[in-house]
Amino acid sequence: MKELVKLIAQSLVDKPEEVVISEVEGEKTLILELKVAQEDMGKIIGKQGRIAKAIRTVVKAAAAKKGKKVIVEIVQ
Amino acid sequence: MDSIIKSGRTVKEAVDAALQELGKTEDEVLVEVLEEPTKGFLGLIGGKLARVKVTVKENKVEKAVKFLESVIKEMGLEDATVEVVSQGDPLKINLKGTRLGILIGRRGQTLDALQYLTNLVVNKNSENRIKIILDIEEYRRRREQTLERLALRLAEQVRRKGKSITLEPMNPHERRIIHTTLQNNPYVVTMSEGEEPYRKVIILAK
């Protein structure tokens, strides 16, 4: 799941080398903290969070297949 | 973008050398002549070589397919394949395979999200944007038929009872299907109400 988020984020930003994802594993949920270069923030959030929402939708579908709840958080 | 600068006795020679090094054909690149060759005195002294800059053109179709293939693989849907249905603008791509319902999602929302992301990735930092339409096992076409039938059925209901009907929220593309289906209907009119993404179509009696 981490790789999926990484793949999508790196494809969207200008500085793929600065994409960092950390996993916080819970019992039923997995939190993925996504961090990108400051100037790339807009490219993964989008107007009214539209891009962030699309990333979450795709990740949620992938997670459902594995029976786990995955939360993608974008951190500064 | 990949680009290299090459020299040669003629422009063609320089371009050929560049193409060989890049492993590309002429229509996959953009050529910029930096310096025309000049013949020196008696073709011997002081001649200058041609210099060209050859840049590999971005292949959007390839980019889209590569992105989708990686996403599918990471999602664990290895048996799915990416098929280009029509090149150009719009670029139409179909995903084929079993158990792809998960990629469609509730009322196509996962499909729409993936289509949106693919559009962003392919058009990133690009001046000539192209539109990409993604479909899975004819989902969009089937959904269109469902919506047309729904529109006709509800219009009939509005005509009989004289009461307006509000549909569930739909995206702009789906709302347009409803409006278009009923635009020449003599008994009803349609309009939209509310804000995205909860905008809904209302069918009213004329």
Image (spheres, coloured by chain):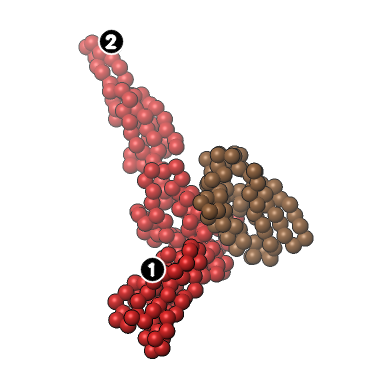
Chain colours: A brown, B red
Mark 1 or mark 2, whichever is nearer to me: 1
Checking the image for residue B176, the label placed there is 1
- Say which amino acid is labelled 2: Ile
Within 10 Å of disc 2 (Cα), the crowding (few <14, some 14-19, many 20+) is few
Could you tell me which residue is drawn at 29 percent across and 81 percent down?
B186
The relative height of residue A45 versus residue B115 in the rendered view (above or below) is above
- Please name the amino acid that badge 1 sits on: Arg
Q: Quadrant of the C terminus of chain B?
A: bottom left
Categorize mark 1 by other alpha carbons within 10 Å: few (<14), some (14-19), many (20+).
some
Q: Chain of mark 1?
A: B
Dot 2 falls on a residue whose secondary structure is loop
The tag on residue B45 is 2
Q: Earlier in the sequence, mark 1 or mark 2?
A: 2
- Protein chain holding label 2: B
Q: Are marks 1 and 2 in contact (CB under 8 Å)?
A: no
Q: Quadrant of residue B172?
A: bottom left
- In which quadrant is the N terminus of chain B drawn? top left
The residue at the far right in this view is A27
Q: Is residue A66 left or right of residue B57?
A: right
Q: Position of residue B35 (x, y in %)?
A: 31, 23
Q: Which mark is residue A38?
A: none
In three-dimensional space, the C-alpha distance between marks 1 and 2, rounded to whole angstroms, equals 71 Å
Q: Residue at x 38, y 51 (%)?
A: B130
The local secondary structure at tag 1 comes to helix
Quarter residue B28 falls in: top left
Residue shown at 39% from the left, 35% from the top: B55
Q: Residue at x 55, y 48 (%)?
A: A44
**Residue furthest out toward the bottom:** B160
Examine the rendering and report whether any part of residue B84 can be seen: no
